[in-house]
Image (cartoon, rainbow, N blue to C red):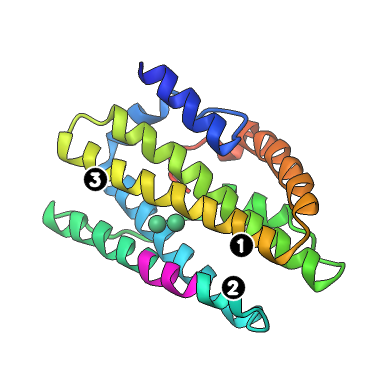
Amino acid sequence: MEMNETTEVRNILGLQLPTDPRWVDLASISLEDVLTDHAYCEQKAATTCISLIQRYSQHPGLVRTLAPIVTEEWGHFRLVLQELEKRGLKLGKQRKDEYVNALIAYQQKGGDVETRMLDQLLTMAMIEARSCERFKRLSEGLQDSYLRKFYRRFMESEAGHYKVFIELAESLVDPTTVRARWAQWLDHESVIMNSQEVRGDRIH
Ligand SMILES: [Fe+2]
Ligand SMILES: [Fe+2]
C-alpha cells in the first residue's frame, strides 16, 4: 500500500528516482538537523519568490501568483521554527545545499529573458517536487505520529506549489516548450540525485 502510494506520488510529479529508502532512518537521527535544513528551505522558497517578482515584474500574472506563495512559505518557515522551539532545539546554521546548487548550475544563463525565466520557474517546480517526495517519506517513516501528520501537510502544500510553478510557466511560455524543457530537467535531476555529493541526509 505505502509502496504504491510512493510510486503514485513519484509518477504524478514525474520524478525519475525515489529518495533512498534509508533516508528516513538517516533523517530521524537528528531531528534538529532535519528541522534546521527544512527551515532554511522554506526561507529560501520565500526569498526566491520575492526575487522572481522583482526580476519579472513585467508579468502581472507572475506577481499575482507568487505574492501569496511568499506568505505561505514564510508561514512554513515559522511553523518549522515553532517545532524547533517547542522541542528545545536550535535553529542551526544554514548549510551549503549541493542539490540546489547543482540545479542552479543547470539553468541556462545566456539566451533571452524568457528562456532564463523558464529555467528559474522550473528550478522551483523541481525543488517543490523533490521536497514533496521527501516530506512524503517523512510522513510515512517517522516514529512520532504528530510529526508524521506535520509532514503530511507540508507534502500536500508543496505538491500544490509544484503545480503552481508548472502552470505559471505554461501561462508565460509556449506550453510545448515548457514540457520539452521540463523533460530535460527531470532527466538531469536524476543525474544530480545519483551524484555522490547530493545523496545526503537532507531535505531540499
Ligand atoms: Fe513550503
Ligand atoms: Fe513550496
The residue tagged 2 is 62
Q: Amino acid at mark 1?
A: Leu
**How far apart are the two marked residues, 3 and 2, measured between alpha carbons?**
29 Å
Image height of 186 relative to 101, above or below = above
Across and down, in percent, residue 83 comes to 19, 54
Q: Amino acid at mark 3?
A: Phe
- State which region is magenta: 66-72
The residue tagged 1 is 168
Across and down, in percent, residue 5 comes to 41, 24
State the mark number for residue 150.
3
Residue under the image location 37 percent in, 61 percent down: 93
Q: Amino acid at mark 2?
A: Leu
Residue under the image location 22 percent in, 40 percent down: 149
Q: Relative to 125, is 175 on the left or the right? A: right
Across and down, in percent, residue 15 comes to 59, 34
Q: Which type of secondary structure does the marked residue at label 2 adopt?
A: helix
**How far apart are the two marked residues, 2 and 1, measured between alpha carbons?**
7 Å
Q: Which type of secondary structure does the marked residue at label 1 adopt?
A: helix
Going from the N terminus, do you reach mark 3 or mark 2 first? 2
- Toward the viewer: 76 or 105? 76
